[in-house]
Image: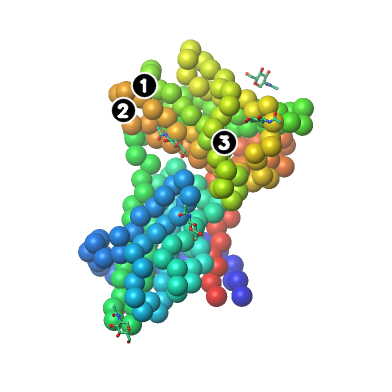
Amino acid sequence: MFVLVTSLVLCELLQPAFLLVPEKPASSLNVRFDARTMNLTWDCQENTTFNRCFLTDKKNRVVEPRVTKKECSCTFHEVCLHGGVTFEVHVNTSQRAFQQKLLYPNSGREGTAAQNFSCFIYNVDFMNCTWARGPTAPRDVQYFLYIQNSKRRREIQCPYYIEDSGTHVGCHLGNLSGLTSRNYFLVNGTSQEIGIQFFDSLLDTKKIGSLGYRDCSRQSHRSKTN
Ligand SMILES: *[C@@H]1O[C@H](CO)[C@@H](O)[C@H](O)[C@H]1NC(C)=O
Ligand SMILES: *[C@@H]1O[C@H](CO)[C@@H](O)[C@H](O)[C@H]1NC(C)=O
Ligand SMILES: *[C@@H]1O[C@H](CO)[C@@H](O)[C@H](O)[C@H]1NC(C)=O
Ligand SMILES: *[C@@H]1O[C@H](CO)[C@@H](O)[C@H](O)[C@H]1NC(C)=O
Ligand SMILES: *[C@@H]1O[C@H](CO)[C@@H](O)[C@H](O)[C@H]1NC(C)=O
Ligand SMILES: *[C@@H]1O[C@H](CO)[C@@H](O)[C@H](O)[C@H]1NC(C)=O
Ligand SMILES: *[C@@H]1O[C@H](CO)[C@@H](O)[C@H](O)[C@H]1NC(C)=O
């Protein structure tokens, strides 16, 4: 049975635990995260009796995918990472308990990420997305847009960029064939000078026309427990 728990309630429950439990040496579980697949993986432990994985974002919201005792990975769906998150894995075996945190910051200089990202669909099949340079982004910044459908099985790179003095500030898609109704948008960037932060967002193509950019801060975080 799935129980939906509001993130706020979960936060309150979890916070004391963060304070009381000292961090174990990082070597034990070897937790790693692949942003492309949104998979969090750790070394499988023999005789596992219990495990859980979750992330906590900057606003202390918690997202916890379901994971069975046999699995040593979990996949996060419908989450945005640009605020930086902390992953955490807890594993109990019949012999001992493991606990490990993994920080996933949005590295790069603050304020370099693309801003004011929005998309709209017109003439049924066309979509334009636009964004602005981050205020602290250096002159040579270049941005790239990647779109993944909700299952993250397919990744599209922007096929046609809209430019401003050579910097990508938008994208035109001539068809929406690769998209599902909900999609994950990532704008990352490069510069010779400094690291560029990324921006990511979840957009619902059925709502893009009328609502435009849907802020990740409104994303409903759910926790499934059984
Ligand atoms: C797992 O459990 C079996 C049976 O209780 C035991 O023999 C084995 O040593 C355990 N493995 C580990 C890594 O603790
Ligand atoms: C991601 O994890 C899921 C299970 O949670 C697994 O089925 C899938 O193969 C993993 N993908 C990759 C690329 O590791
Ligand atoms: C896992 O181990 C920790 C530390 O021994 C313990 O406090 C916790 O209750 C255990 N959790 C479960 C579900 O067994
Ligand atoms: C983003 O939009 C806000 C509000 O419309 C505006 O104040 C701000 O200057 C914009 N940022 C950039 C980098 O254009
Ligand atoms: C979308 O972008 C394309 C490419 O820059 C442009 O030709 C077109 O006019 C834009 N459409 C709208 C409705 O702004
Ligand atoms: C749809 O757009 C993609 C690029 O985004 C292109 O590779 C593909 O050929 C297009 N399909 C059609 C039917 O135009
Ligand atoms: C941007 O993200 C894409 C897709 O995940 C990745 O392939 C690419 O290497 C990233 N580029 C930078 C500069 O981080």
Tags 1 and 2 touching, CB below 8 Å: yes
Query: For the point 53% across and 72% down, which residue is it?
Result: 225
Q: Residues within 10 Å of mark 1 (few under 14, many from 20)?
A: some
Residue found 48% across the figure and 29% down from its top = 144
Callout 2: few (<14), some (14-19), or many (20+) C-alpha neighbours within 10 Å? Answer: some
- Residue occupying the point 36% across, 24% down: 191
Q: Position of residue 84 (x, y in %)?
A: 40, 47
Rounded to the nearest angstrom, the CA distance separating label 1 from label 3 is 26 Å
| Closer to us: 92 or 104 | 92
Relative vertical location of residue 119 with respect to residue 74 in this rendering, above or below: above
Q: Which residue is mark 3?
A: 156
User: Residue 90 vs residue 80: left or right?
Assistant: left
Q: Is mark 3 within 8 Å of ligand 6?
A: yes
- Quadrant containing ligand 1: bottom left
Residue linked to disc 1: 138
Secondary structure of residue under mark 1: loop
**Residue 193 place in picture, x, y as percent:** 30, 24
The earlier-in-sequence mark between 1 and 3 is 1
- Going by the numbered disc 2, the residue's amino acid type is Ile
Assign a secondary structure to mark 3: strand
The percent coordinates of residue 98 (x first, y second) are 30, 71
Mark 3 to mark 2: distance in Å? 26 Å
Which numbered disc, 1 or 2, marks the residue that appears first in the sequence? 1
Circles 3 and 2: CB distance less than 8 Å? no
Disc nearer the start of the sequence (3/2): 3
Residue 195: x and y, percent? 33, 31
Residue 102 is marked as none
Task: Give the Cα distance between marks 1 and 2.
Answer: 8 Å
Type of amino acid under label 3: Ile
Check disc 2 and report the residue beneath it: 194
Tell me if I can see residue 61 in this picture: no
Q: Quadrant of the C terminus?
A: bottom right
